[in-house]
Image (spheres, coloured by chain):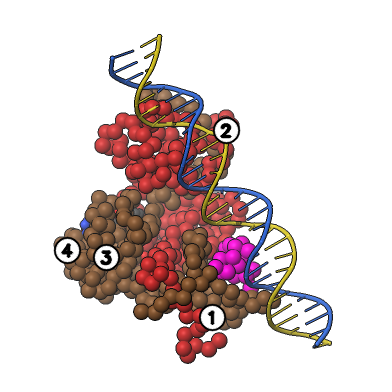
Chain colours: A brown, B red, C blue, D yellow
Amino acid sequence: MIRRIPQARDRGIPDATVARLPLYLRALNGMAERGTATVSSEDLALAAGVNSAKLRKDLSHLGSYGTRGVGYDVQYLIYQISRELGLTQDWAVAIVGVGNLGRALANYGGFASRGFRIAGLLDADPHVVGDRIAGLVVEHADELESVISKRGVSIVVIATPATAAQRVCDRVIAAGVTSILNFAPVVLAVPDGVDVRKVDLSIELQILAFHEQRKANGGPIMAEEWPDGVVM
Amino acid sequence: MIRRIPQARDRGIPDATVARLPLYLRALNGMAERGTATVSSEDLALAAGVNSAKLRKDLSHLGSYGTRGVGYDVQYLIYQISRELGLTQDWAVAIVGVGNLGRALANYGGFASRGFRIAGLLDADPHVVGDRIAGLVVEHADELESVISKRGVSIVVIATPATAAQRVCDRVIAAGVTSILNFAPVVLAVPDGVDVRKVDLSIELQILAFHEQRKANGGPIMAEEWPDGVVM
DNA sequence: GTGCCTTTGTGAAGCAATGCACAAAGTCGA
DNA sequence: TCGACTTTGTGCATTGCTTCACAAAGGCAC
Ligand SMILES: NC(=O)c1ccc[n+]([C@@H]2O[C@H](COP(=O)([O-])OP(=O)(O)OC[C@H]3O[C@@H](n4cnc5c(N)ncnc54)[C@H](O)[C@@H]3O)[C@@H](O)[C@H]2O)c1
Ligand SMILES: NC(=O)c1ccc[n+]([C@@H]2O[C@H](COP(=O)([O-])OP(=O)(O)OC[C@H]3O[C@@H](n4cnc5c(N)ncnc54)[C@H](O)[C@@H]3O)[C@@H](O)[C@H]2O)c1
């Protein structure tokens, strides 16, 4: 195993920065495709939709990869960010719950392109098991542990109904998985050391509704109490 | 039109708070279903997966709806949060781009249940137009403006390929929409006053990969320069 | 070389969110 | 009615993130 050489820059990259690195990477890839060789923090920030000082500070957490007076070498920066994010290696992903959403995810080509290989599709419904989706055969959820260990799955996507999510979560953690992407509308309880990220469309819509309401009337109508007819 | 009575509490609810209100609401709904009448900040915070002091501070932005020594009335708090989020009214939502993802969204029952009514499905592909999904017929993207205005659509979900997203975005804004939920992996440029929220699965996976890599070897392998064979 | 110009990298200030800790407010049993 | 107990609501310290502003670094023209 390769020993890490501790350096100032690898200690604690802020979460906010990590969340933006993929954005920079995407913008850089677009530029690379268009043949751009170098880019200034100003232009890259514009493409990523952030403030240029923030971009520079973010990149400074990875190291000093720019050239003053010139900017950043696009290819080099792509490589450095990819390495930092762990995209220079392949990650095996399993999708649990192959319903509406699970199918859409399985059919989506955008994952494989960035080093995320779908290594398994699992479902509890016998009618779904055996279906062939995007070149993979759906396996029974009973196989979860064996699929995870045999195929080296390190990231699990949960797309089951909310009621099944915690149980699935417990099982994949017991099987050694420590990275979970959850689509079910529940707060998953997990031990320390396990990362859960959630995607919750319903919450996103509610946040939009809040702002939409504000825009419409400058704030919620100040009905101080319950509407007529509702008793406390 | 009902005039708003300005009060201390309706000025500027922090974004971080707004983003958590739907979480509290969900936890409260679960409690209401199980017949719980009142709940303490401690218990509600536990159910929502946050710190109880934070929960209390969040709720204090809406008003003083708790009872010291007792807690919060579940039904009353559900009503107050719903009102604050604008969920006491119905929102008409249009989905643009009815591919893998758009179909999954259209088939998903969880939106309607919280006041988000899908009022239109639009796609540019003539093979898709006319399909019947979840009781709605897919219309041609040319109808976008007329669907928005005739059906009072105020929130648009963009589920088209990345290349089409900005154009769709421009059109819906021109049609008067100011709230957009974007699934396409692009940074949408919008004028002030328009809210865009994005859901980017690829970014979520990359963030997970970053942490997974850290867990595996305590940080990225410190290859200071390019890998063998790559020239700068 | 030398000096000008551009752009980075970062100290420091400003701002927002978090979490602690406790006084104030209210309940409830006696 | 009173006193013990519970739990809220919030002042305050702390932490983390953002943004400004500029010195230092480097390229490039002459
Ligand atoms: N479809 C959407 O657009 C959407 C939007 C927001 C949230 N969600 C959430 O995503 C999740 C999936 O949504 P969906 O629309 O695909 O639901 P779905 O009902 O179409 O699919 C769920 C699938 O999970 C399978 N399943 C159930 N229990 C399982 C278990 N224990 N192990 C493995 N598989 C199991 C079911 O057989 C089914 O195939 C839900 O929690 C939903 O709330 C979906
Ligand atoms: N499917 C997923 O799981 C997933 C995951 C992450 C991101 N995304 C993103 O979500 C978007 C949709 O993904 P998908 O898998 O559904 O793609 P898809 O190709 O299956 O569907 C896209 C649909 O948009 C339609 N379309 C194209 N141009 C249009 C226009 N101008 N107006 C209206 N409709 C138009 C197409 O006809 C097609 O039906 C993409 O941007 C994709 O990158 C999808």
Residues in magenta?
A40-61
Tell me, yes or no, whether the highlighted magenta stretch contains residue A41: yes
Tell me the kind of residue under disc 1.
Gln
Dots 1 and 3 on the same chain:
yes
Q: Which residue is tagged 4?
A: A142
Q: Label 3 lies in what chain?
A: A
- Toward the viewer: B102 or A172? A172
Tell which circle, 4 or 3, labels the residue nearer the N-terminal end.
4
Q: Which residue is tagged 3?
A: A176
Q: Which residue is tagged 1?
A: A75
**Residue at disc 4, secondary structure:** helix
Dominant secondary-structure state across the stretch colored magenta: helix
Alpha-carbon span between mark 2 and mark 4: 55 Å
Tell me the kind of residue under disc 3.
Gly
Asked whether mark 1 and ligand 2 are closer than 8 Å, the reply comes as no
**Disc 1, disc 3: CB below 8 Å?**
no
**Disc 4, disc 3: CB below 8 Å?**
no
Q: Residues within 10 Å of mark 3 (few under 14, many from 20)?
A: some
Residue at point 50% right, 61% down? A14
